[in-house]
């Protein structure tokens, strides 16, 4: 289901929220010497990769260059970008935008805030509908970067950003993806969508030149008939590719290949192009609930039917998302060879085995979420923590709640310390006053009793 998204139907300035992050290959993965050359300290957690198969091997096919012969055999996702690939530096926001950010933050910090459990009831503001407070999982999802994504998507209109975030929280509850670690409480689980992934039609693999994790969509490998479970599968894989984002990167790359696979089509009667209604439903989910997540979408091998479908769905794609679509370009211009599937001029000899890939990608993603939640509680929890810290490995908080990376954190700490000391100096006086007042009341009671 190769569809695309960015902002809502409103245009906004294109901004990438990101910051430098160092990363390296997992211990058991071997990159060609032509890549980073060596490994370094990791900037995000590395799940157990004991079964990684990423060794260089020579191709015996004639007519291929030496570079093409040195392939990386891979059966599971790369856990992180090469050590010399980093996200671009985060762009600063204006003082006015910082104040708008703080207004949205304060709204969601309100302990009395409740949100509906369905998207429809939230938007219609139905008073008798079921509402509940934010869970810790939802507070962890509501990061500094999350708030900024919605503000950019709504052109910095505070009320619209608040409404959109509340709508997404309600939708996540209704769709069944609102629990970070306990899949048994979610509707969309690895077990539910497993049949959809048996042919590898949606795969998380590699990182682009800006350290965005790549999600391959391969409609030609479609193995099931049109159903809502296909939508659930796409959302599930979007959530997984987000788990793979390194500290400093909050967007992803889509690599969409429409190449036909007759060997799969021969085994099951499927439709490679979804109905227009399904396409619009998916676009609504992506553009409404995953704003500013798309960094780049590369499309290739588009057949006539796919191009016809694109013409039908194109009016529903917001203008800035269209700017991120790249048709029939060389994928290797956007993803370095040792991170790119060999089918697209890369060096990765990726062989999809569902029995190996599916449990591994789920386990790796779970490990990342565990790391994320551990750090959420380590830094005190609450709405507005930064993904720079939640996905990072440093012991100290680098972006306190309410601040931006370019703010003077040291000045903020000094002010906080001063206010704390002032508050503590007043406590003894208050206690003495309380004691005097209590003594006086006691004496008055004694007199009355006499």
Image: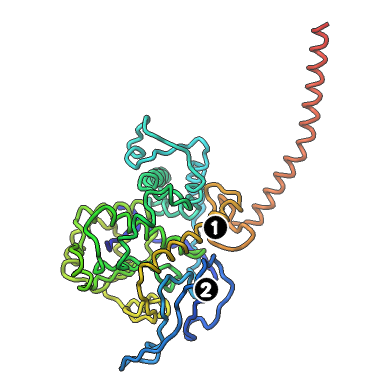
Mark 2 Cα within 10 Å, few/some/many (few <14, many 20+)? many
* Residue 53 in the image: above or below residue 92: below
Q: Is residue 267 left or right of residue 113?
A: left
Considering the image in quadrants, where does the N terminus appear? bottom left
Q: Which residue is mark 2?
A: 26
The residue lying toward the viewer, choosing from 301 and 260, is 260
Residue 250 falls left or right of residue 272: right
Residue 278 placement: quadrant: bottom left
Distance between mark 2 and mark 1 Cα atoms: 20 Å
Left or right for 132, reference 222: right
- Does residue 276 appear in the picture of this structure? yes
Q: Is residue 12 visible?
A: no
Q: Residue furthest top?
A: 450
The image position of residue 132, as x and y in percent, is 45, 37
**Would you place residue 325 above or below residue 422 in this image?**
below
Residue at figure coordinates x 26%, y 68% from the top left? 221
- Classify residue 45 by image quadrant: bottom right
Residue 390 circle label: 1
Q: Does 221 sit above or below residue 176?
A: below
Q: Nearer the viewer, mark 2 or mark 1?
A: 2
**Figure colour scheme:** rainbow
Q: In the image, what residue occupies the spot 68% across and 49% down?
A: 415
Locate residue 289, reporting x and y percent. Answer: 36, 51
Assign the C terminus to one quadrant of the image: top right
Within 10 Å of the Cα at label 1, are there few (<14), some (14-19), or many (20+) other Cα atoms? many
Q: Circle 1 — which element?
A: helix
Residue 394 falls left or right of residue 121? right
Residue drawn where x is 34% and y is 81% of the image: 345
Q: Position of residue 112 (x, y in %)?
A: 50, 35
Residue 244: image location, x then y, percent: 46, 64
Splitting the image into 4 quarters, where does residue 275 fall? bottom left
């Amino acid at each position: 289901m190769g569809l695309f998204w960015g902002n809502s139907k409103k245009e906004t300035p294109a901004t990438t929220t990101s910051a430098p992050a160092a990363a390296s290959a997992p211990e058991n993965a071997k990159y060609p010497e032509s890549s980073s050359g060596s490994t370094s300290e990791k900037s995000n957690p590395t799940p157990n990769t004991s079964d990684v198969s990423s060794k260089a091997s020579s191709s015996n096919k004639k007519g291929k260059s030496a570079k093409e012969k040195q392939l990386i055999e891979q059966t599971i996702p790369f856990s992180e970008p090469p050590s010399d690939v980093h996200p671009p530096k985060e762009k600063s926001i204006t003082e006015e935008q910082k104040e708008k950010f703080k207004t949205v933050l304060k709204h969601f910090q309100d302990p009395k805030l409740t949100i509906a459990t369905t998207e429809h009831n939230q938007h219609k503001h139905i008073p008798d509908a079921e509402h509940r407070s934010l869970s810790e999982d939802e507070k962890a999802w509501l990061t500094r970067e999350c708030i900024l994504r919605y503000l950019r998507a709504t052109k910095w209109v505070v009320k619209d950003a608040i409404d959109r975030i509340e709508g997404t929280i309600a939708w996540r509850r209704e769709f069944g993806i609102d629990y970070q670690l306990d899949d048994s409480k979610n509707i969309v689980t690895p077990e539910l969508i497993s049949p959809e992934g048996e042919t590898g039609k949606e795969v998380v693999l590699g990182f682009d030149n800006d350290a965005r994790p790549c999600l391959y969509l391969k409609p030609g490998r479609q193995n099931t008939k049109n159903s809502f479970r296909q939508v659930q599968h796409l959302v599930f894989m979007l959530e997984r590719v987000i788990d793979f984002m390194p500290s400093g990167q909050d967007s992803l790359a889509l690599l969409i290949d429409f190449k036909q696979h007759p060997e799969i089509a021969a085994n099951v009667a499927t439709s490679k192009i979804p109905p227009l209604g399904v396409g619009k439903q998916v676009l609504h989910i992506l553009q409404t609930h995953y704003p500013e997540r798309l960094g780049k979408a590369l499309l290739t091998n588009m057949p006539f039917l796919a191009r016809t479908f694109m013409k039908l769905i194109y009016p529903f794609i917001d203008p800035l998302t269209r700017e991120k679509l790249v048709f029939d370009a060389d994928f290797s211009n956007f993803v370095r060879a040792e991170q790119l599937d060999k089918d697209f001029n890369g060096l990765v000899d990726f062989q999809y085995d569902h029995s190996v890939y599916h449990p591994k990608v789920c386990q790796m993603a779970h490990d990342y979420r565990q790391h994320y939640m551990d750090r959420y509680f380590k830094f005190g929890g609450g709405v507005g923590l930064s993904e720079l810290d939640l996905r990072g490995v440093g012991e100290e908080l680098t972006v306190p709640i309410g601040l931006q990376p370019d703010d003077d954190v040291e000045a903020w700490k000094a002010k906080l310390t001063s206010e704390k000391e002032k508050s503590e100096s007043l406590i003894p006086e208050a206690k003495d006053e309380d004691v005097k007042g209590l003594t006086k009341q006691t004496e008055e009671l004694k007199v009355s009793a006499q």
